[in-house]
Image (cartoon, rainbow, N blue to C red):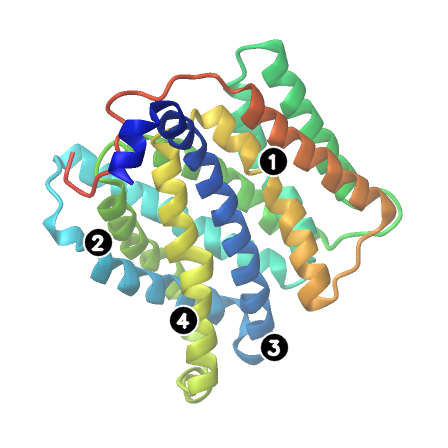
Amino acid sequence: MTSLALKHPVLAARIGTLWPYAAVIAAILSFALGTTVAKSLFPLIGAESAVTLRVVLSALIMAVIFQPWKAKRTGAHLWLTVLFGLVLGAMNLTFYLSLRTLPIGIALGIEFIGPLTVALLGARRLSHVAWVGLAGLGLVLLLPLTGQAIDPVGAGFAALAAVFWAFYIVLGKKLSNFDPGRSLALGMAAAILVVAPVGLGQMDWALVLTPTVLGLALLVAILSSALPYSLEMAALKHLPRRTFGVLLSLDPAVGALAGLLILGEQLGGLQWLAIGCIVAASVGAAATSREPTPKSAIPTDAPA
């Protein structure tokens, strides 16, 4: 691979430019699949227990992989990482609580208000505003604001998740420069402090400790947290927050499709149109981003 890159510097540069976008898309696909598996656990153990198992197992997986205790960081970095983890835990908890009464695509559509706000605040050119506006139009069409009613409690939890998602992007961007893998592992451990008090009291341990539930929970932990968050943290080091926020507009669309194909959650005609708008916005944002990649933005597992 190295010799190929040396012989074809243009190809190597193009790959270096495109891989963060591919990482975000892979993270979105993984998260959507993991969310459908998680929602299938709700009838067995409930949303609170499902999110607690997801966070705890994810924290264990990432601790083994990244060994966060080896990270060298200042006190300020440590507190920033803990704050990131608390936000991460709150985002996961409120999102799962919204899924109790909302289809995946609708919940993600409301939650996407967070990344959309980050993208809009980061807009610097007219084209930036246009892509954010198109994603926003898709969001409005995706939500059943006319006709079919949505559960207000579920919508409220999704709106809270949107706030936490926005802070996740902002804090994640800061932490991406400080050993992102170990920062994420430590943050996921801190997230347990948020979900455990809610989930542990709801758990039916006799059911949770069965091979079927533990196996599905482990799959959720990998697909919904360990893999997508690792990919996102790596991509955040190379992408502007605005571009990252618009790319995440694929989340409601992919989530809606996963809900349809796996869980049978139906979409209306306007919601299919919404998916087209959201996908177009993501493609447009990626195609018109010309920010140079910082020289310091080299993937590494060494402490910053």
Q: In the image shown, does 284 or 250 lie closer to the viewer?
A: 284
Proximity of marks 2 and 3: CB atoms separated by less than 8 Å: no
Q: Residue tagged by mark 2?
A: 66
Outermost top residue: 125
Q: What number is the disc on residue 113?
A: 1
Spatial CA span between label 4 and label 2: 18 Å
Q: Who's the residue at 79% across and 45% down the image?
A: 271
Spatial CA span between label 2 and label 1: 31 Å
Q: Which image quadrant: the N terminus?
A: top left
Q: Secondary structure at mark 3?
A: helix
**What residue type is disc 2 on?**
Phe
**Is 7 on the left or on the right of 152, as rendered?**
left
* Quarter of the view holding residue 209: bottom left
* Quarter of the view holding residue 168: top left
Q: Residue tagged by mark 4?
A: 218
For the image, the number of numbered tags is 4
Q: Nearer the viewer, mark 4 or mark 3?
A: 4
Task: Of the two numbered discs 4 and 2 on the same chain, state the one appearing first in sequence.
Answer: 2
Task: Of the two numbered discs 2 and 3 on the same chain, state the one appearing first in sequence.
Answer: 3
Spatial CA span between label 1 and label 4: 29 Å
**What residue type is disc 3 on?**
Pro
Task: Of the two numbered discs 2 and 1 on the same chain, state the one appearing first in sequence.
Answer: 2
**Is 87 on the left or on the right of 36, as rendered?**
left
Q: Residue tagged by mark 3?
A: 43
Q: Who's the residue at 48% across and 16% down the image?
A: 290
Q: Secondary structure at mark 2?
A: helix
Task: Of the two numbered discs 3 and 1 on the same chain, state the one appearing first in sequence.
Answer: 3
Q: Report x, y in % for residue 188.
A: 32, 54
